[in-house]
Image: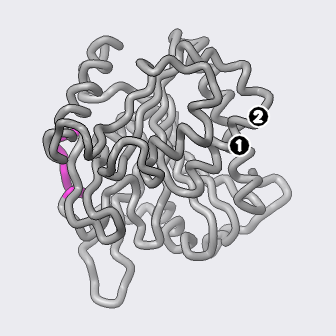
């Protein structure tokens, strides 16, 4: 398949969430039919949680064999277990607590009140990913997620890879601890770009005028690691096409310049 980004435009956030949820159900069911199970990596934020909430209300969710679905995260806020700001807590409230998932299938990143400091926590999660990849017969550092979800910030960060921090250039590790993040909390855990690229599909969910420039950069095909320039938006780790399959760009609200919303979009 092509790795050319695909832009899907919707009228508003609710429509985007519903359409993405329906599409995600279809992809999970197809993956389970093709290779027996499916794995997805979740993201936090309003758009990621909105998709999960829409999926929880989607009648088609019953087509998923929840016993054959593995749940991972693309990043996490290094906070105590159950903290309302943790991505895992928000995902449980939006969807995971409402479907028949075995806790062993839900692979949360370590919490700050656990036994691991941030860097050790990243190593533990990396080891869990590597073990899952090995059991799936893969020689990679992470399993080939059927879908990996990402949001994008106005500063163009994805997962917890911020353009001004060194983690965006990490090539050897699959999971890193992020220290000094420019938005709270300052300490986070994140998949790296090589781990993100291992996904069969990467979906970038963006909504609102403040994300339009970030989406434009993601679709522009410019180099991944442009240096920061005074007075200009720093280019993020974009584009982030998967090694296999296609990246999906789902945008709501403001359409990037040069893209016209039509009746057939979405």
- Determine contact: label 2, label 1, CB under 8 Å: yes
Give the residue displayed 67% in from the left and 72% down from the top: 254
Magenta extent: 167-174
Query: In this figure, which residue is indicated by the disc labeled 1?
Result: 54
| Closest to the observer, 88 or 154 | 88
Query: In this figure, which residue is indicated by the disc labeled 2?
Result: 58
Quadrant of the rendered image containing residue 139: top left
Horizontally, residue 141 falls left or right of residue 53, namely left
Quadrant of the rendered image containing residue 130: top left
Distance of mark 2 from mark 1, alpha carbons?
6 Å
Secondary-structure class at tag 1: helix
Magenta highlight on residue 197:
no
Secondary-structure class at tag 2: loop
In percent of width and height, residue 25 lies at 67, 29
In percent of width and height, residue 85 lies at 44, 54
In percent of width and height, residue 39 lies at 47, 25
User: In the drawing, what numbered circle is on residue 15?
Assistant: none
| Closest to the observer, 187 or 150 | 187
Give the residue displayed 35% in from the left and 69% down from the top: 183
| Closest to the observer, 201 or 129 | 129
Which SS does the magenta portion mostly show? loop
Does the image show residue 261? Answer: yes
Instruction: Judge the density around disc 1: few (<14), some (14-19), many (≥20) Cα neighbours within 10 Å.
Output: many
Instruction: Judge the density around disc 2: few (<14), some (14-19), many (≥20) Cα neighbours within 10 Å.
Output: some
């Amino acid at each position: 398949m092509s790795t050319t980004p695909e832009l899907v435009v919707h009228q508003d956030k609710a429509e985007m969430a519903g359409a993405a949820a329906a599409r995600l159900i279809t992809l999970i069911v197809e993956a389970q039919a093709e290779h027996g199970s499916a794995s997805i990596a979740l993201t936090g934020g309003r758009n990621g949680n909105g998709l999960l909430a829409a999926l929880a209300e989607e009648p088609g969710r019953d087509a998923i064999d929840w016993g054959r679905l593995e749940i991972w995260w693309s990043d996490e806020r290094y906070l105590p277990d159950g903290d309302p700001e943790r991505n895992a807590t928000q995902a449980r409230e939006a969807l995971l607590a409402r479907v028949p998932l075995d806790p062993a299938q839900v692979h949360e990143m370590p919490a700050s009140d656990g036994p691991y400091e941030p860097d050790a926590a990243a190593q533990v999660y990396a080891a869990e990913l590597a073990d899952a990849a090995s059991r799936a017969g893969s020689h990679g550092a992470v399993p080939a997620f059927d879908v990996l979800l990402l949001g994008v910030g106005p500063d163009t960060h994805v997962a917890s890879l911020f353009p001004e921090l060194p983690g965006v250039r990490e090539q050897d590790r699959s999971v890193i601890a992020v220290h000094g993040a420019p938005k709270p909390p300052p300490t986070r855990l994140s998949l790296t770009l090589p781990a993100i690229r291992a996904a069969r599909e990467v979906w970038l969910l963006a909504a609102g005028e403040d994300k339009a420039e970030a989406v434009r950069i993601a679709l522009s095909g410019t180099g991944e690691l442009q240096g920061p320039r005074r007075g200009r938006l720093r280019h993020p780790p974009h584009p982030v096409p998967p090694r296999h399959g296609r990246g999906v760009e789902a945008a709501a609200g403001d359409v990037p310049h040069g893209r016209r919303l039509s009746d057939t979009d979405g």
